[in-house]
Each structure stands twice: as structure tokens, then as C-alpha cells.
Image: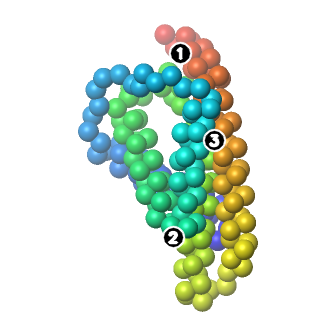
Amino acid sequence: MPRRLLVLLAAGLFWVGAVTGFFTAPSASGGGSDSTYTVITLALANGRAVLTLAAGVVTLGATTFVGLVSSGYLFGAGVAASTLSVRFIAYLVPHGIIEFPALWLAGAAGLRAPLWASAYLRDIERPPPVEVVRRSILDTAFAVVLITVAAVIELHITPVVADAIASLHK
């Protein structure tokens, strides 16, 4: 299955979870996290998510499926609990445009092997297994790079951009 279709499938699973979370999550009260993040801690936390999604290569897609849907659910629940303001969107977009595709690319890597196995069982033409593993490793490595770039943006660029946009909309 071509990479773009795998990424679309991964994004679709994420958005199924997001819509479900938006409409079914209990409303949250109180403030957000009081944790202090660094680029390293944020990249490691998001990197674990990337590796969990990519682990579908060896779990026949189980970690990928659960990871995509639950990540989407948490995102949807967070959006539902927030005020959809210009400030909220400004805090999400600068790093989100890189972070979400990184998660979906890792999801595509994790879905590749189980879909290959399905094609094998149905006797459909498929690439050699070595190629499936190679592509999954490359996609995962690229997703790790993207998630690290997103962490840098989230900590150093997003706040500046969001504060500037919020000051324009007071």
C-alpha cells in the first residue's frame, strides 16, 4: 500500500478518536499542566508516542490502532474542554502542523506490516518483507526527526507567535 494511503488511514484513525473524544469526553475543569518542559523532555515524551505507533510493525498493528485512536481521543477531549479562541488555535497550529503529520507517519509505519501480512494471507501482490521493514524504519526515523522539530517549535516559537496573535485580538 502506498505511503500516502497509509498516512491517510493513520490520520483517519486519529480523527475518529478526536471526534469521539470531542463529543463523549466528560468536561474537564481546572487548569492545565503545571509541568515545565524542555525540548528534550517534550521530544522524549512525543518520541515515545511515535515509537509506540511504529511498534505496530511487530504487534500486527495493535499498538498503532490503539495509539492513534486514543491520541485522537485525548486531542478531541482537550479541544472540547478548551475555549476555541484565537489564542488556543495560535498555540496549537505552529507546532501542530508538524507534530500531527509526524504521528500519522509513525502510524503509517506501524500499519504497513499488518497490511502486508493481510495481503500475504489473501495472496495479493506485495513488496518483499525486507522492503516493508526498511520503509517502516525510514518512516519512523523521519517521524522522530519531525517530532523533535515540533518540540523545538512548541517551546521556542509557538509562545511568541501565539502571544503576538493574541495581542492583536484583545
Callout 3: SS? helix
Image position of 138 with respect to 38: above or below: below
Instruction: Report the side of 15 relative to 81 (left or right).
Output: right
Task: Tell me the residue that label 2 is attached to.
Answer: 60
Image vertical order of residue 134 relative to residue 68, above or below: below
Residue 103 in percent (x, y) is at 57, 49
Which callout, 1 or 3, points to the residue nearer the camera?
3
Q: Residue at x 59, y 84 (%)?
A: 120
Q: Give coordinates of residue 17: x percent, y percent.
A: 41, 51
Identify which residue is drawn at 57% across, 78% down.
Answer: 117
Q: Amino acid at mark 2?
A: Leu
Look at the numbered disc 2 and give the secondary structure of its residue. loop
Q: Which badge, 1 or 2, is on the more N-terminal residue? A: 2
- Badge 2 crowding class, 10 Å Cα cut-off, few under 14, some 14 to 19, many 20 or more, is some
Distance Cα–Cα, label 2 vs label 3:
23 Å
Callout 3: few (<14), some (14-19), or many (20+) C-alpha neighbours within 10 Å?
many
Q: Label 1 belongs to which residue?
A: 166
Reading the image, the residue beneath label 3 is: 147
Q: Residue lying farthest bottom? A: 123
Q: Amino acid at mark 1?
A: Ala
> Is disc 1 surrounded by few (<14), some (14 to 19) or many (20+) residues within 10 Å?
some
Is residue 97 in sight in this rendering?
no
